Amino acid sequence: MRNPLIAVAILLLTTAPSFGLDISDKLKIGGEFRYRHEIIDRDDAVTQHRHRIRGKLFFDAVVNNQTNLIIHFTTGPGGIQETNQTLDEGFSTKNFDLDAAFVRLAPSDVPGMIIQGGKMLSNLVRPGNSELIWDTKIRPEGLALNYKAKLNDKSNLLWAGNFYWIEERSDDEDSYVFTPQLVWELNPGTAVNRLILGGSYFFYDNIKGRSPFWDAELSYGNTLDADDNYAADFELVEILAALDINSGKIPLNFFFDYVNNTAADSLNTGWSGGVQVNKLDKKGSWQVIYKYRTAEADAVIGLFTDSQFRDALPNTDGHEFSLWWTAMDNVVLAATTQAGEYAGHEDFWKLKLDFIAKF
């Protein structure tokens, strides 16, 4: 077997007494399967229909009362954020690779602090799970620090400081990103359940004049110079806000995310906003989400932004509407439609129909 970690995962699963439960007081296992039918219609291509699957396995091992080891596996063809496998190529086998592997330390001497290292899930606050700057599937690599300071009974201050390596080069300076974030959180306990206001700074170093990340031949919508290298640096200022309220028995969540690339002279702004109605929990629950997104060509790094919204291209604006329903315990059905315009002239439309089962 080409990946020894996968062999370990299979061994753990075959020896576990049950799925979705603690197999001991030291190890938890979880997973997810998604089947998707997707329809894509663009001005520059024929209408595309495809069936896709995604599988995930999660392992969380307790080292001691302050330390956890987390390992995730996922399907996908490899790359930055593609976890779907299209059903094609003559029944060929599909890849199943390492998605995350990191250590999480919560020092008992400093309550509210969490330190992480490795290839990890993002630890930043995202209003409405915003994917304006980074897709939720991005697994940054490096070091991360979070601290939650209690101001009073109803408010907290959330701070994050991360240092992630993007590209290591033997013949040039490395590319990396430093991402401090500060968020104020208010929980008044009345009709307003939660209010967050905050900001982030994404300082990317050694970007301008270097070839695009991951695939040197693809710009993912960003402006390139005459040598096909990044034409701008990226120093992003983010402003974010979210408001959770009760409207009768139906909770509402309003969210807003704004970004400006202060290192670019033009084509440097973007924003996203929307509303979530109700939430998924028990069988029969439902949820409706509406989002609007717009981003100019150099507002964000195209490789890292929402991969499902016009294939991770900035210079795009459009709408997304989704409906979610918990059909039975741990099984969700979802329908999502996206429509918008790329580069001011190319229309696109996408429909995603999902069956999701978790354990």
Image (cartoon, grey):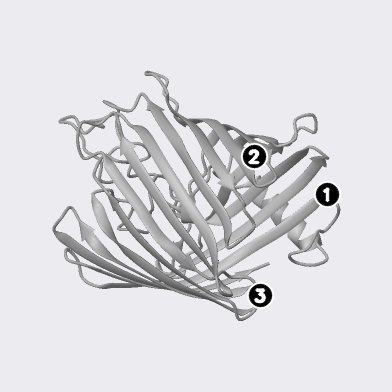
Foreground pick, 123 / 112: 112
Q: Is residue 226 left or right of residue 77?
A: left
Question: Percent from the top left, x then y, of residue 172?
Answer: 37, 18
> Can you say whether 99 is above or below 226 in the image?
below
In the picture of the structure, the residue carrying the numbered disc 1 is: 26
Count residues near mark 3 (Cα–Cα under 10 Å), then give few for <14, some for 14-19, many for 20+: few
CA gap, disc 1 and disc 2: 16 Å
Marks 2 and 3 sit apart, C-alpha to C-alpha, by 31 Å
**Could you say whether the residue bearing mark 3 is in a helix, strand or loop?**
loop
Q: Tag 3 or tag 1, which sits nearer the N-term?
A: 1
Q: Residue at x 38, y 39 (%)?
A: 214
**Which residue lies under the disc numbered 2?**
102
**Which corner quadrant holds the C terminus?**
bottom right
Three-letter amino acid code of the residue under disc 1: Lys
Q: Position of residue 10 (x, y in %)?
A: 71, 57
Helix, strand or loop at label 1? It is: loop
Residue at 38% from the left image edge and 18% from the top image edge? 171
Return the residue at label 3.
282
Mark-to-mark CA distance, 1 and 3: 28 Å
1 or 2: tag closer to the N-terminus: 1
- Residue that appears at 49% across and 44% down: 197
Residue 308 position within the rendered picture, expressed as x and y whole percent measured from the top left: 37, 59
Looking at the image, is mark 2 or mark 3 nearer the viewer? 3
Above or below — where is 43 with respect to 269? below
Give the amino acid type for the residue marked by disc 2 in the picture: Phe
**Is the Cβ of the residue at disc 2 closer than 8 Å to that at disc 3?**
no
Q: Mark 2 or mark 3: which comes first in sequence?
A: 2
The amino acid at mark 3 is: Lys
Q: Residue furthest right?
A: 25
The structure residue drawn at horizontal position 56% and vertical position 51%, both measured from the top left corner, is 97
146 left or right, relative to 267: right
The local secondary structure at tag 2 comes to: strand
